[in-house]
Amino acid sequence: MAALHLISRSPADSRALEQCLARAGEGDAVLLIEDGVYAAAEGSGSGEILRAATGRVMVYVLMPDLEARGLDIGSPCLRAAGANNSPPSPAPALHPVDYRGFVNLTASHRPVVSWF
Amino acid sequence: MGKKFLFILRRSPQQGARVRETLDMLLTVAAFDQPVMLLFLDDGVYQIKRGQSPESVGLPAVAPTFEALALYDVEAVLVERESLAERGLTESDLVIPAEAIARAEIAALVADQDVVVTG
Amino acid sequence: MERFFSSMKYAIQINSAPVQSQSVHSAQQFIKAALAEGHEIIRVFFYHDGIYNGFAVDAAWPALARQHGLDLVLCVSAAERRGMAAGASAELAEGFRFGGLAQWVDAALKADRTLVFGG
Amino acid sequence: MLDVEGRTLETTADGFLVDPANWDEQVAAVLAAGIPIELTEAHWEIIRFIRAYYLRFHHLPNNRMFVKAVQKEFGAEKGNSRYLHRLFPESPVKYACLIGGLPKPPGCI
């Protein structure tokens, strides 16, 4: 079965997301929770890493945690990371989930790996 | 009802009781005769680096505790080759024998587990 | 609403203190959502600094335990290491009990999934 | 405090020796008498084992690990909880550590 990776640390103080994606397998899922959702924010510097993973892994964002931080999934930040290129790189696909979606992801993946 | 357990250590030593407690968890799983693997990734490879002397600054030594793995029949001790290389280390710098595996092999290893604990 | 997955059994491990990070809250939200989906929480095992949950004034765990009959187990050796175990059973928050690492292994063996919250 | 032939050794509230380096077989005999356990060669074998284990690995096992470790060292006829409980009632690892002059092992209230 494919694994679900949980990222709960901000990319500014942990390389967990990057280090996780370096090992995640084809078809694995990554879920950003808690401060991990900052990877989706402007200036986080994670846009490139996430873009590189697109197609190989599915990246989900826990919406309650994103919204609690005043962010939203359509924020232009991820596009901005590739702004020097022309045409602009497409934003990596981030899939929104709520807690119910989180639970469903844990049911459809095994094992669940928390990266700190 | 057997399960496959993998413990991944990614932190450097001297992070309080944390690694020690994670190791206790692993050894308890082994004492229940469940298949258990240990993988050192990233700064975790420093856990088993030779020549540490934490006692000199009053900190407990963790590296000797890894030598107990063999006593509990934990034979699957793995270390990521790239994590070692990025830190200028080789397998001969380690206090216990660990099988080097490539970064590219880790996804398949993880996917094969039931329970993964990172510490 | 149609459910895509049959009922699952979860073992939950909590590693952080209640005031330390959002993790404890995340775990509680996850547990509520899982129960609402008809899944089962076999046990919540508090390890590392997670043991402080058993001594917190926060009423969220006692309320969850009461409503859903959750088994909340504080690791006795982690509590001892932090000076929180000896004769302290009487001071435990409602719904908690002390247990050994064997309780974690037992839950992980019975569960379909084991999740770890709190770095 | 523990008095052993004129020496006064510091102990914890639970009766464990504070400094494992102060331990010798006379100290062990006094510690065992306080439980009380009458030491036989079978006890000594286990006590010497757990001391060597602690000094080598800087680690103390819980009960479950202890049984497994003894099993690996001495075989299944000794590495089982019945045998160990006969020697050290209640908690084998706790009393083996106590008599061996080691700190209190994890997981015993």
Image (spheres, coloured by chain):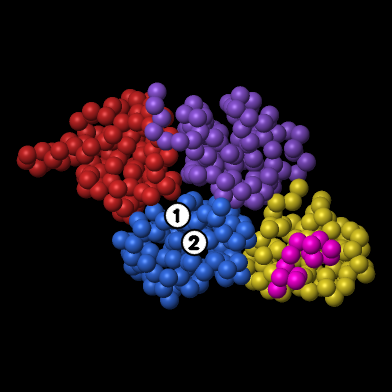
Work out whether B32 lies above or below C23: below
The structure residue drawn at horizontal position 50% and vertical position 44%, both measured from the top left corner, is: C112
Q: What span is in magenta?
A: D75-87
Which hue is chain C drawn in?
A: purple
Which hue is chain B drawn in?
A: blue
Callout 1: residue from which chain?
Answer: B
Which hue is chain D drawn in?
A: yellow
Disc 1 versus disc 2: nearer the observer: 1
Q: CA distance from mark 1 to mark 2?
A: 9 Å
Q: Can you give x and y, in whole percent of width and height, for residue A40 in the image? A: 28, 36
Tell me the kind of residue under disc 2: Met
The structure residue drawn at horizontal position 31% and vertical position 61%, both measured from the top left corner, is: B104
**Which residue matches tag 2?**
B37
Crowding at dot 2, Cα within 10 Å, few <14 / some 14-19 / many 20+, comes out as many
The structure residue drawn at horizontal position 48% and vertical position 66%, both measured from the top left corner, is: B77
Question: Is there CB contact under 8 Å for labels 1 and 2?
Answer: yes
Q: Can you give x and y, in whole percent of width and height, for residue C45 in the image? A: 59, 42
- Residue B35 visible in the snapshot: yes
**Which residue matches tag 1?**
B113
Q: Mark 1 falls on what kind of element?
A: loop
Tell me the kind of residue under disc 1: Gln
